[in-house]
Amino acid sequence: MKVLFTNPPWYKAPTATQPGWRGVRAGSRWPHTFEVHSHTIHDGLIAELVGGYLPFPVWLATAAAFAKREGFDAVIRDSLSMGETYESFYAYVKQFSPDFVVLESSTPTVRIDLEIAAHIRTLVPGVKILFTGLHVEFEQEDFLERHAEIDYLIYGEYEVPMLQLLCALRDGNDLADISALIYRSDGVVKKNKDEPQASKQNVIKIRKNAFAKLPDLSSFPWAEREGLPNLNYFDGVCGLERPQLQLMATRGCPYGCIFCAWPQMLFRGPRYRKRSAQDVVDEIKANLAKVPYKSIYIDDDTFNISKEYVVELAGKLKEAGIGGVIPWSTMGRADLMDRPTLEALRDAGLFSIKYGVESGDQDIIDEIDKRMNVEKNVAMIRLTKELGIRVHLTFTFGLPSDTVDTIEQTIQLACSLPADTVQFSIATPFPGTEMYRMYDEKGWIVSKNWDDYNGSTVAVSRTENFTAEQLENYVKEAYRRFDQAQVERSFNSGDAVNKLRAAAASLEKGTPVVVMQTSRVHLTRWILGALQDLGLDVHLVTPLRFKDEFSALLPKDKIHAFTGNSHFNYAQQSGWARHLKSSQDFKGVFIPYTFESRDGYDDVERLAGELGGRIVAGITQRGNLFSYTA
């Protein structure tokens, strides 16, 4: 049996008047989209669809590994992370001609995924198709009734039931005992109750099997990575570099956050499961031997539930020569940390960590069943930073009892904490969660069009105190204020100005120089102002979408905006940069960097050479300044 495990394409090309987008689906706790402003196809791949945040499809890859271990001819194709076009994907499916397809779908992608499944059927007649993933309708029998293009549904954590289904189909066994499976089965019913027994006829019934106990993780193979775009997966938490190895050490969380989808929909309860620390380290070592990974991301729901486990893992990472050599990151709860645990993790190479804060108001935290003490949370965030571990914090607006005062309290808290990066989100009730049930009951759901649940462009709920539009505006305001507060923290001492003055000492007053808008707007604004104070003739090169952000700082003729892309791309903009250089005669370039690693800035630095001949200095959002060396 030939089995295709697929994370198919999900994107929309930009037009002359509207941006496009790319999406992330498999492996993401929240399938969502990002804007793209150009669309370059080469050999069936779209360059603009890769390069940013891309989660590793851990469930799909583990399912593929199970199938391979059982002897199936299994292939995993992550078209989304390849940047593959729909046309290229369909050509591959036709060529491979699978007997069985496993498609991990999601709420915002289910419509397009059904279209994909229907088209696969035209290419490979007789193929069987399984849908699974993070979508509430996959638990409902009538979904299979309504969609003849798919044959099976598995709800919840799906790797083991998927393998049982494949084996049952191969061996001709009954499907009745396979956990969480929804399938079609022949049944026998009468045409009506008064007709004789002989008038009975066969009909198709939809059967739904119960969800069984979750399996022990010790039985799981390592995720399959052969044939995947392993250099593309990336979560750059606070400056991690790529290529990045992503994996899971634990699954589940015993806490009850009403918005968290994986524990409620995939694990279906508060159970917390651990792999052995040695197995995790062995998987890391085996993958490092194959790919020159520069960082590691452990993508657990709540990594530090067990203090003993994380300390043991930290020790084994050090023993293996990984800890302290390759930086790594994870996601946990600040209130579960203490100094000894943080010191053990730091000594094992923990570079950064994501903490969920959500709100600065304790009553709000209690209401969403986070079971977290705000004061303890804040204290451990500050200790984490004090010990040299970088911190990413998440905050949420539009929680059930949020008011103007509680949101203001949350923004003030975010601006006061020593975070390296933050995420402000609108509380989005994902269908199938307790939050969705609560908001639906209150009449707060403003859209039940599944396409809208993409986490980026449309607010799908409101609250008693806020409209969806008001919540969107609070997110924008919070980012603006946090960025401003971070720049003020990093640059108020005057050290950065003195370093910048020293770097620019060879440039006479009035010399034309250019700053590239390549990081946060507030950092670029600071650099522009500091260079103007030094008497230089300052120009800005920026994507068009940022142009208005600088109109109060520079005359129009000194803001040079390019169209066709939201990022700097050497292949597309090198000719434009050389023309601009010839007309303005820039004598140097200054580059704002998000992080000291300069990861992802290759095209920026090449274009800087075309614009100004040399890079005078780079300045990071943490207030560090350095001269560029090729």
Image: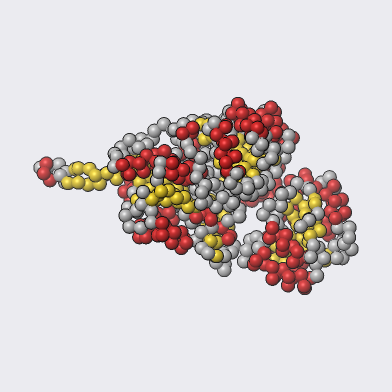
* Residue nearer the viewer, 404 or 579: 579
Q: Nearer the viewer, residue 29 or 66?
A: 66
Residue 168: give x, y in percent of width and height: 33, 41
Residue at figure coordinates x 60%, y 44% from the top left: 289
Give above or below for 140 relative to 84.
above
Residue 140 visible to the viewer = no
Residue 596 percent coordinates (x, y): 73, 49
Q: Position of residue 372 (x, y in %)?
A: 60, 31
Quadrant where the C terminus is found in the figure: bottom right
* Residue pictured at 57% horizontal, 32% vertical: 278
At 24% across and 44% down in the image, what residue appears? 186
Q: In the rendered view, tell whether residue 11 sits above or below residue 217.
A: below
Q: Residue 432 occupies which quadrant of the picture?
A: top left
Q: Is 469 drawn above or below residue 584 in the view shown?
A: above
Residue 311 can be seen in this image = yes
Q: Residue at coordinates 64% horizontally, 30% vertically from top-left?
A: 315
Residue 586 x %, y %: 80, 67
> Depth check: 392 or 439 in front?
392
Counting labels gives 0
Q: Identify the image's colour scheme: rainbow, by chain, secondary structure or one colour.
A: secondary structure
Quarter location, residue 208: top left
In the image, is residue 461 above or below residue 342? below
Q: Is residue 497 left or right of residue 225?
A: right
